[in-house]
Image: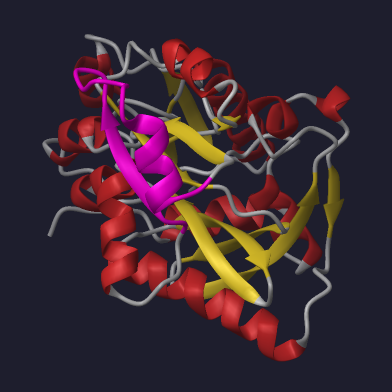
Amino acid sequence: MKKKILIISGGISKERIISLSTGKQVSNELKKHGYDVKITEPDFKLLKVIRSYNPNIIFNALHGQFGEDGYIQTILETTKIPYTHSGVIPSAIAMDKELSKKIFISNNILTPKYISYSFNKSKLNLISIINQKLKFPVVIKPINEGSSVNVFICTKKNIFKNLNLLKNYKKIIIEQFIPGREIQAAIIGSKKLGAIELKPKRKFYDYQAKYNSKAKTKHIIPVNLKKDEYKKLMSLAHKAHNLIGCKGVTRSDFKFFKKKFYLLELNTQPGMTNLSLVPEIAAYHGINFIKLIELILKDASKKK
């Protein structure tokens, strides 16, 4: 008898639409293969739904705040039911871009130089600080958003204009802009799944480039790297996955510049839509969509 799977999708983050798409596509695939599936929102009825449906495994299809930052994981821990993807602490660490950067740096994983910026600070010396520590152009982004939501590449001319767009966040990251190739690597459990290179027609691989088919981002697989370079890439992704303590599937976003890999961030809840990268990487390596989902279910997180 096939297992009962409860999929949690939707939520209140800026990535709600992507989450709904992930949930629907995972649900359709599981149903096609005989699973008993129910989809629910992470609202005040969630625990009641979990108790009444009593699933074997909960599939976390949420993205962004509340879904991949440790909050929903904290709630799921109370149910004693296995749930997919990373647990409370790894999710919280990976979602916090400053904290995860500190871990990468302390473990000799190259990541762009950065400064944190709070909006209660004066902007008077910001340009000189950036010139001294980073140099322009720079990338500004919230500390705790995913899918490149509210990420901007800034010059001296437009940095204050773009900062104003982020003023609802208490704290942001300002980091060194690394040119070069955009390469993403996927890990599932202890397996080095593979990598893909992206050539966006936009300035960088932002939210529109990720989820709008009209953006026409070029996906290149296999990635054109030397054997030792590819091995280094996958080893770095695997190291980051293990350092944070992740489970299930993760996707690490890299820039490759002057023969060096810079880890931008690690995503503990990569999308599972028809435009998502992890299913594409898996398919190239002979793992179809249902097999990928079943691997994620098999590695479901569980409170010990």
Q: Position of residue 131 (x, y in %)?
A: 45, 45
- Please name the residue shown 70% across and 28% down the image: 211
From the image, which quarter does the C terminus lie in? bottom left
Let me know if residue 229 is in the magenta part: no
Instruction: Please give the range of residues in magenta.
Output: 112-135
* Residue 136 placement, left or right of 164: right
Q: Nearer the viewer, residue 11 or 264?
A: 264
* Residue 107 placement, left or right of 183: left
Q: Number of numbered discs present? A: 0
Question: Which residue is the extreme one toward the bottom?
Answer: 228
Q: Nearer the viewer, residue 223 or 281?
A: 223
Q: Position of residue 220 (x, y in %)?
A: 85, 58
Camera sees residue 28: yes
- Please name the residue shown 72% across and 58% down the image: 180
**Residue 46, placed above or below residue 95:** above
Q: Position of residue 216 (x, y in %)?
A: 88, 33
| Residue 21: quadrant of the picture | top right
Camera sees residue 83: no
Q: Nearer the viewer, residue 294 or 229?
A: 229
Question: How did the renderer colour the structure?
Answer: secondary structure
Q: Nearer the viewer, residue 6 or 19?
A: 19
- Please name the residue shown 47% across and 18% down the image: 160
**Residue 202, placed above or below residue 181:** above
- Please name the residue shown 26% across and 17% down the image: 46
Let me know if residue 122 is in the magenta part: yes
| Residue 276: quadrant of the picture | top right
Q: Position of residue 293 (x, y in %)?
A: 57, 50
**Residue 62, placed above or below residue 272:** above
